Structure formats: C-alpha cells, structure tokens
Image (cartoon, rainbow, N blue to C red):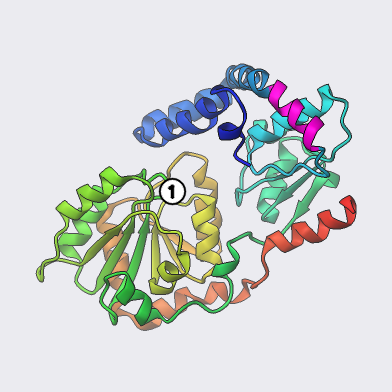
C-alpha cells in the first residue's frame, strides 16, 4: 500500500513525497545545505517526523486492528516509524521487518524500530551497524529488481525499432527517474552537438513538461546526434534491451537495474547528496563511472561507441552478478516465520 496516499492526512505525503520532490529540483548547494543541517540538527527533522506520524497514527492503528496482518514490511523508513508506533500503542505483537534500499551509507533516521532490517550489500550492512543497529537484526539479501529484468531480454534490434531508434547504432539510455528531475540540458546539449557515433533515449518519467521541451529542443537532424525523448514506460524490458550503456542519476532503483542487466552506468549527477554512497559503490566495483561535466560524458560515450574492446572490458565486472532476485531471499526468510 501507499501509506501517504491511502491513510487520512497530508503531513506524511508533505514530508516524504512533496518536500523530497522540491529538494531534488534545487541546486546542489541547496541540497547539500539541507542534508548538512539535518546531520547537524537531526532533532528538527525528528519533530517534523513525529508531527506527521501523530496525524496518521489513528488510521494506522485502526488498520492493524481490522486487517490483522501477519507481518509489516515497509520499504520506506518513515512507514517503519509509523507502524512501530502503531503496534506499540495497540500492544500488537505483529513482526516489523524493514527493507533498506540503498547500496551503501545510512542516516540515523533509518532506525525505525524494526525487528529485522534487510539490506542489499555488505557496505549497507556496515553502515547500518554504524548507526547503532545490532548485527543480529541485519540480513543481507541479493539485489532486488523487477522479475522481468532477470534472464534474457528481448531482441535488441527489435527493441530499438519499437522505440524509434536506429537498429545498429550504439545506444545510451538517459534516465531522469520516475519524477523526471535532474541535470538535463547541459549534458544533452553537448551530446546533441558533439556526439558522432551514438544515439540516446531519454526517459522523462512523469514529467510531461520536460518531455515536450526535449522534443522541441532536439529535432532529428543529420548533423546532430539522435536524441529520442519518451515519457513514462512500464515496459522496462524493451528499454534495457535497447541499451548498450546507461547514464543519469544513481538512485538505488536505477543502479540495481543497471547491475542486474549488465549495463554500465555513467553517473552524470547526484539527485541528492545521499546518492554519493551509491555512486562510490558502483565506481569502486567497476559497475559505473562518474562524469559530472557534460564534455566528459559525451567523450566517454564516444569512446565506448568506437572502441569495442574497451566497451567489452567494461562488462567484465558484471560476470559475478547473479540472476537471483533478492525478493526471493526475503521470502525465504519471512515465510517460515509467519506460517
């Protein structure tokens, strides 16, 4: 369930959704300042969090009493705090397991009162222990991704045709996440002008205004690189099948999808300062590169497009990636404990 949308009250959505969208749209110095203030004065966010939980608590308590779940497993720490408060207030013994979805790093507010914390890497495990969560409450799973991205993907040429791309051209997928927010024009402008050996599919998510702007800004011309903007797509198999390379922010969802589909990720920007831990995780293991300058992004794309040996070498770190879905690890852990 989407707690912010389905429980009465607006404060949860204001705090965890709308305010986050506003932060993502700010310049880096504003985002860095906001995160620095949170680290220096965590009690301020703590007060806002308590206020939001207090509004939603009666409905959460009623949900536990009427629905009587066998297990609560939130994927956002804010929901973890809410349901931990609700079960304590209602004297419920329902287990609360939390899935931490970052690849590395952790902030103190992640401690949400869960009985068990699932995490996606040893780096994340170490970070969670550092903020005070006992090792006995931590379980490391494999990376979690949509099942349709595991195994063999559709035919590459056919996928490119479907997306309006040239079948035999080196292809980059530029993702701006579900909200379509991030550094866009400087990177696309440079690639459009200077790209010679690659084409780019740009995913704008739910940002329809951005989609229209890109369609007007990058018309197809023989003297420029081909850029094909598309809006939200539920069919990720076709998108990843078409791609030789990925670029964009390094939110965990996109990072995990890149790893599991064996597509190198060139990180061009950080959506928020906490993504620096994901960036470092990918770069350290050879799953990606970091190019914060538009000229560097274009240059690296061009290098991979014309040097097949170098591109194939960039795929070698993915040989140890399994086809197992971490969701199966969670099921294997949870089912015996609730049946």
Q: Which residues are magenta?
A: 57-67
**Residue at image x 24%, y 57%?**
295
**Residue at image x 32%, y 69%?**
163
32 to 122, vertically: above or below = above
261 to 142, vertically: above or below = below
Could you tell me residue 153's position as x and y percent? 50, 77
Nearest to the observer: residue 157 or residue 282:
157
318 to 90, vertically: above or below = below
Q: Quadrant of residue 311?
A: bottom left
> Residue 264 vs residue 151: left or right?
left
Which residue in the structure is indicated by mark 1? 178
User: Callout 1 environment at 10 Å: few (<14), some (14 to 19), or many (20+)?
Assistant: some
Could you tell me residue 191's position as x and y percent? 22, 60
In this view of the protein, can residue 74 be seen by the observer? yes
User: Is residue 141 located in the magenta-colored stretch of the structure?
Assistant: no
Nearest to the observer: residue 48 or residue 291:
48
Magenta stretch, main secondary structure, is helix
């Amino acid at each position: 369930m989407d707690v912010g949308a389905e429980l009465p009250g607006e404060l949860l959505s204001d705090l965890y959704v709308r305010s986050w969208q506003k932060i993502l749209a700010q310049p880096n110095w504003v985002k860095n300042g906001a995160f620095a203030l949170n680290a220096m004065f965590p009690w301020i966010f703590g007060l806002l969090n308590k206020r939001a939980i207090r509004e939603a608590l009666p409905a959460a308590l009623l949900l536990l009493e009427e629905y009587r779940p066998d297990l609560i497993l939130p994927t956002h720490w804010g929901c973890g705090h809410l349901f931990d408060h609700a079960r304590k207030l209602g004297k419920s013994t329902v287990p609360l397991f939390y899935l931490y979805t970052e690849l590395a790093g952790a902030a103190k507010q992640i401690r949400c009162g869960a009985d068990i914390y699932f995490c996606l890497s040893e780096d994340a495990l170490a970070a969670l222990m550092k903020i005070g969560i006992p090792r006995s409450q931590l379980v490391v799973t494999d990376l979690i991704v949509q099942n349709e991205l595991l195994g063999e993907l559709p035919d590459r040429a056919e996928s490119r045709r479907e997306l309006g791309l040239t079948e035999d051209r080196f292809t980059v997928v530029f993702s701006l996440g579900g909200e379509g927010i991030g550094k866009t024009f400087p990177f696309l402008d440079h690639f459009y002008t200077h790209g010679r050996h690659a084409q780019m599919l740009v995913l704008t998510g739910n940002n329809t205004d951005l989609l229209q702007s890109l369609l007007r800004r990058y018309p197809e011309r023989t003297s420029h690189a081909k850029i094909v903007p598309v809006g939200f797509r539920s069919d990720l198999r076709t998108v990843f099948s078409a791609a030789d390379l990925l670029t964009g922010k390094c939110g965990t969802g996109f990072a995990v999808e890149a790893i599991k589909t064996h597509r190198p990720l060139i990180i061009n920007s950080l959506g928020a300062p906490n993504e620096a831990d994901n960036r470092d995780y990918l770069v350290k293991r050879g799953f990606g590169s970091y190019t914060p300058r538009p000229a560097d992004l274009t240059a690296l794309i061009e290098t991979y497009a014309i040097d097949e040996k170098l591109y194939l070498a960039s795929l070698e770190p993915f040989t140890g990636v399994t086809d197992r879905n971490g969701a199966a690890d969670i099921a294997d852990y949870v089912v015996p404990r609730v049946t």
